[in-house]
């Protein structure tokens, strides 16, 4: 009836506890086997010798040799109180002691550890009936021994309590009792775990809005005061039944009304006593570890490791307990409608998606995935950028552009425009707001000014400065026919502008025209420089007003440019001959008849008669 695995366990255990060198003798081994076999001889076939028999057989010799301390022996025997659990606890502790004597390092390490599974296997005496029951009973009675301070748990492994370990356990028990009686500490611990559990559950929740997939955020709010929606996030008000009754949460949800974007979450009060006990044990173990000085002995380090096991087990147990609370959570919409489901993340996502419709009722106007392309094209000056959102019409009639145009009115900074249309009611994507502004700029319906009041060309407006840029509605509009005439004037100085890009070419037109005027006159004998008052007047205007000023002076400018071009070309042809004449005249000084020539040249120069 001695199983091979137990025979090998006995061999190693006997060598480990053998201080006098007698246990390894064949006679001693045969004696133990004989006594063990006799103990089960009257049992039916299928009964085997328990792995703990060696302890009972050799306890006297171990006490005599000092391997087994008297208090350990008394602890193990004292657990036998006449009950089945008492006998099982005593046998299990005897095995824990034997396993602790085995080498745990080097080549002698057998790999046997005092875990619940190993203890259950070694305690089996009836192969047909004991296995399943022991696998259920041993973990339970070992946890009881840990709670009683008789045994330490190091990870999955059990060790008998030592003197220093008992001091750690005593401090742990004192702290646990103190924490359990401290209502404020218990409330704080519970709230911390509730928040941690909800945060972990909702951490992976991604809320995107509409076809544009605009990202949205949840604002988790804890406490008794109802959150205020600021338009940038969906408020999620989380409360628990430890602090408020379900009826109060339902009343608050109903009172908020059907237009409220707030999501109401109620965490149920489940397994309250188990949660309280586990919280106290977890906190007590953590406090004991942090408050006690670093141990300097092996026993002390073992005791600390046992306390660390309590912390880890407490953490796992709390995760399980609060996981049940999270799984039973309930979610309500503003107005009182309950979102049904079994997963808090899914229910919160459904409620938050519904809340978006309440928070941003005008979102659908700008809900299109093409707005990033609209901005990109408009920033390059394309007049048909709105085609990227399926709009072939005029910018002023586009719903997004129309709303922005109305809001700008007398003038607004980019930051205010963004805040208005990205916030409550609208909730538009940033690309739609910036794209709409850029389209309006290209169309000449608004103009942009920097902080010095200088007009910014649409192509030069960088996205990073939109916030501090001032936008104003153009008071004048330029028709397509007028733009055609303006482009013809621009062509007079060699500039070719695309439709809608005329304004961007006006500054270069003014520079080129001024240079041409300067070439059409100058110092004597050239004609006097022509007046460029018209150019200055145009230069002083901005936006559509500048285009209209150019349009209104188109005939005068066209004629002037033709005249200036002719004069400049003739001057360029005559001035080399004039310069030659001046050099020759300098050489004619003193020659007969030179005075007549000098008088003629002087007259030409004074009268500017080069041409």
Image: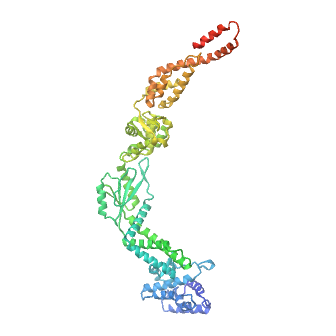
Report the colour scheme: rainbow
- From the viewer's side, name the closer residue of 523 and 506: 523
- Taking the spot 57% from the left edge, 83% from the top edge, the residue there is 101
Extreme residue toward the top, this view: 593
The reply to whether residue 185 is in sight is yes
Task: List x then y, in percent, for residue 243.
Answer: 34, 65
Rendering quarter of residue 473: top left
Q: Would residue 153 be found to the left or right of residue 367 on screen?
A: right
Position of residue 182 relative to residue 34, above or below, is above
Rendering quarter of residue 137: bottom left
The reply to whether residue 393 is in sight is no
- From the viewer's side, name the closer residue of 244 and 40: 244
Task: List x then y, in percent, for residue 251.
Answer: 29, 59
Task: List x then y, in percent, for residue 335.
Answer: 30, 55
The C terminus appears in which quarter of the rendering? top right
Task: List x then y, in percent, for residue 8.
Answer: 58, 84
Q: Would residue 532 be found to the left or right of residue 398 on screen?
A: right
- Taking the spot 40% from the left edge, 55% from the top edge, the residue there is 219
- Taking the spot 55% from the left edge, 24% from the top edge, the residue there is 515
Q: How many marks?
A: 0
């Amino acid at each position: 009836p001695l199983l091979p695995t137990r025979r090998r366990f006995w061999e190693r255990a006997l060598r480990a506890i053998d201080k006098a060198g007698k246990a390894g003798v064949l006679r001693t081994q045969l004696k133990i086997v004989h006594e063990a076999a006799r103990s089960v001889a009257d049992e039916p076939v299928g009964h085997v010798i328990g792995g703990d028999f060696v302890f009972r057989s050799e306890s006297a010799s171990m006490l005599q040799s000092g391997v087994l301390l008297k208090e350990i022996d008394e602890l193990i025997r004292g657990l036998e109180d006449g009950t089945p659990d008492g006998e099982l606890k005593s046998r299990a502790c005897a095995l824990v002691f034997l396993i602790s004597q085995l080498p745990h390092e080097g080549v002698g390490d057998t790999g046997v550890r005092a875990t619940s599974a190993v203890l259950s296997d070694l305690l089996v005496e009836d192969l047909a009936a004991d296995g399943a029951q022991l696998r259920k009973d041993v973990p339970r009675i070992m946890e009881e021994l840990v709670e009683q301070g008789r045994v330490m748990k190091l990870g999955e492994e059990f060790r008998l309590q030592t003197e220093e370990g008992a001091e750690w356990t005593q401090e742990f028990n004192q702290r646990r009792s103190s924490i359990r009686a401290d209502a404020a500490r218990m409330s704080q611990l519970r709230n911390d775990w509730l928040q941690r559990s909800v945060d972990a559950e909702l951490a992976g929740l991604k809320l995107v809005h509409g076809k544009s997939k605009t990202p949205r955020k949840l604002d988790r709010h804890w406490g008794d005061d109802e959150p205020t929606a600021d338009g940038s996030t969906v408020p999620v008000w989380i409360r628990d039944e430890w602090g408020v009754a379900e009826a109060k949460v339902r009343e608050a949800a109903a009172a908020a009304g059907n237009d409220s974007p707030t999501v109401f979450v109620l965490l149920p009060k489940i397994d309250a006593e188990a949660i309280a006990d586990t919280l106290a044990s977890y906190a007590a173990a953590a406090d004991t570890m942090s408050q006690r000085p670093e141990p300097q002995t092996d026993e002390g380090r073992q005791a600390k490791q046992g306390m660390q096991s309590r912390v880890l087990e407490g953490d796992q147990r709390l995760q399980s307990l609060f996981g049940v609370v999270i799984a039973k959570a309930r979610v309500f919409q503003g107005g009182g409608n309950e979102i049904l489901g079994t997963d808090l993340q899914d229910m919160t996502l459904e409620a938050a998606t519904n809340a978006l419709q309440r928070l941003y009722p005008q979102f659908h106007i700008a809900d299109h995935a093409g707005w990033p392309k609209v901005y990109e094209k408009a920033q390059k000056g394309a007049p048909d950028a709105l085609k990227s959102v399926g709009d072939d019409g005029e910018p002023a009639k586009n719903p997004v552009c129309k709303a922005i145009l109305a809001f700008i009115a007398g003038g607004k900074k980019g930051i205010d425009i963004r805040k208005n249309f990205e916030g409550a009611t609208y909730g538009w994507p940033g690309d739609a707001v910036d794209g709409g502004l850029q389209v309006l700029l290209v169309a000449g319906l608004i103009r942009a000014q920097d902080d010095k009041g200088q007009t910014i060309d649409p192509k030069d407006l960088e996205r990073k400065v939109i916030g501090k840029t001032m936008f104003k509605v153009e008071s004048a509009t330029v028709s397509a026919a007028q733009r055609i005439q303006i482009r013809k004037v621009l062509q007079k100085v060699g500039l070719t502008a695309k439709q809608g890009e005329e304004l961007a070419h006006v500054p270069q037109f003014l520079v080129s025209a001024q240079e041409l005027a300067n070439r059409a006159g100058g110092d004597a004998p050239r004609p006097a420089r022509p007046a460029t008052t018209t150019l200055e007047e145009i230069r002083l205007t901005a936006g559509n007003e500048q285009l209209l000023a150019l349009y209104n002076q188109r005939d005068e400018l066209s004629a002037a440019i033709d005249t200036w071009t002719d004069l400049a070309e003739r001057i360029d042809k005559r001035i080399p001959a004039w310069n030659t004449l001046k050099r020759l005249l300098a050489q004619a000084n003193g020659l007969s008849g030179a005075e007549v020539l000098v008088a003629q040249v002087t007259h030409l120069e004074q009268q500017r008669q080069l041409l």
